Image (cartoon, grey):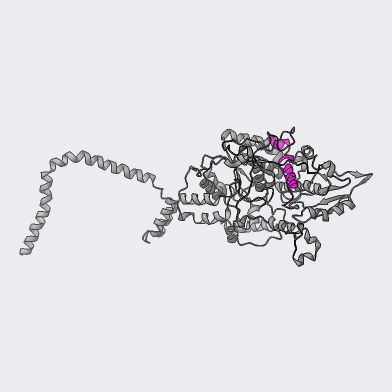
Amino acid sequence: MKYRKQRHETAAVFIGLPIVLLFRRRRRIYHLLPFLSALSGALLLLFTLLSYLSPPINSRHRHFISRSSFNNGTEFRKKLLEEQVFRVPMGGGSLSSRDLWNSKKSNFYHGCSVATDQFPTAEVNTLPNRYLMIATSGGLNQQRTGIIDAVVAAHILNAILVIPKLDQESYWNDSSDFSEIFDVNWFISYLSKDVKIIKDLPRMGNKLIKPHTTRVPRKCNAKCYQTRIQPILVKKHAVQLTKFDYRLSNRLDTELQKLRCRINYHALKFTDPIIEMGKKLVERIRKKSKHFLALHLRFESDMLAFSGCYYGGGEKERLELGKIRKRWKTLHSRNPDKERRNGKCPLTPEEVGLMLRALGFGNDVHIYIASGEIYGGDETLAPLKAFFPNFYTKETLASKEELAPFSSFSSRMAALDFIVCDESDVFVSNNNGNMARMLAGRRRYFGHKPTIRPNAKKLNKLFMDRNNMTWEEFASHVQNYQIGFMGDPMEVKQGRGEFHENPSACICENSNVKDREDITIPGNFAMNFDKGTDSADDSARRSFGEVIDGHISEDEQDLFDTTDYMENEVDQGRALPKEMKADSSQLFFKTEQPELEEMFSD
């Protein structure tokens, strides 16, 4: 009883004491009421602001909630944290010490392709009654390589070149002839001092000359042509070389390489209607934005089928692309995961958008898409459009009536894309096909404008792991991986890679600007040369280019190196393996790879 009494007394003290204190200090509390009201209002405002800034619980969050709410919330918290951490910014920011739209070091170099006095002129070099004809293969830019190399081959053979015949039967099914895409008279006139070119095969007396049809191996060098083709020319007077793409060695002497540049960058000019339409497209973008980026997306069904890659479309995708893949009978099945790990798969439009945002291109950047029909259509393009709402194609910039003369001809449509991409401030390729290589070399020769090629092998793993890092970490990795893939000077070792992408023999050091890093690169509408000029040194047509001598990863070494190494060994009289000595023809060429005209994709 005594214990209960003490407990009640204690409880009474604990209850009564606060009441007594409260009554004693009630006057002070009245004075604190305004302060407490203000504090409560501030807390309410803070909670409201936090709820506004926090991400909404969308369908993905609801999915995690329903699945994980009884699992201590561990997975839900993890996924929610990932989405909060990897938040792609609207603005791009900028790369440290890099101007997105210019290349600072381009001041130091310029394109140079003028022949020296040692290069024999057409008048001296050409022998009578020797005519070379070629039939090109593939799409527009693959055919362009054939045209360039045909002129050089004619010079090597001391022959007259007949205007090349374009491929009208391949996958692209374009009936255009040479004169409907290129200015044929300008082509003949510009090269008149280098090689004699005629439009049609002439008669010998009263007889038509019947050309001997043959084919040379890929990467055939000067000695190969002289040994294999010259004797036929002497006997038959006319030779037609079929499937003429990449049939000339990547490595020639400097004078022949400079001839390649004169052909590619000066003699091959699109027809006036193509140039005028291309100009209109460029001008319409320029009216909307001072700078713009052009992307050769190359995400059409034929490209994806050829790549052997898989993009998550299930059985429907496998069946559709598998059916297209059967067009190439010599293609072997590939492991999609291995192809992606090795950087052989084009990036998805979303991945391209992530890469560009990480490199510093914000959502205010205007972007032109050079592409055919995208596999998956608008649904596939949606993520890229979300990154860059200012989004253009030929079809959005021009009316159907304006495009009518071109729309039925794939090569003419490709020529329009070529012009816009060439004139863009930044060009981005999504595969290293013919168009990408041609434009990369051209942009080095004329103006050295930024040219981005994804380092797909490194980026693939980064895309897979992106939810395990912050956006800042992701962007930093992208910027590091893209070093050497931005089109800057000194990126690629001189002589490495395919010559049309890396025309190192045609890039000269511009010594008079050594100490003038503030020089502005002159503009140049490279497709519209003035016909009154005939030299790469004319100031109106010359821009600064790029000397390339530096690092290149082993993965990036071009397939041309192996063949050309063998040719150099032969030319310099070094010993060859016994199995090669048995067949003297192997002294001049490598056994051909399976001939897929679409292999070097446009």
Point out the residue furthest to the right here: 206
Residue 61 screen position, x and y as percent: 42, 53
Residue 32 seen: yes
Which SS type dominates the magenta stretch? helix
Residue 218 location in percent, x, y?
75, 55
Answer left or right for 494 relative to 176. left
Residue 229 vs 414, above or below: the answer is: below
| Residue 269 shown in magenta | yes
| Foreground of the two, 386 or 283 | 283
Q: Quadrant of residue 559?
A: bottom right
Residue at 41% x, 48% y: name it: 56
Observer-nearest of 139 and 261? 261
Q: For this view, does 448 lie left or right of residue 151?
A: left
Please report the bounds of the magenta region as a residue range. 251-276
**Which image quarter: residue 370?**
top right
Drawn side of residue 62 relative to residue 521, left or right: left
Foreground pick, 447 / 384: 447
Residue 2 point in image, percent of width and height: 5, 64
Tell me if residue 196 can be seen. Answer: no
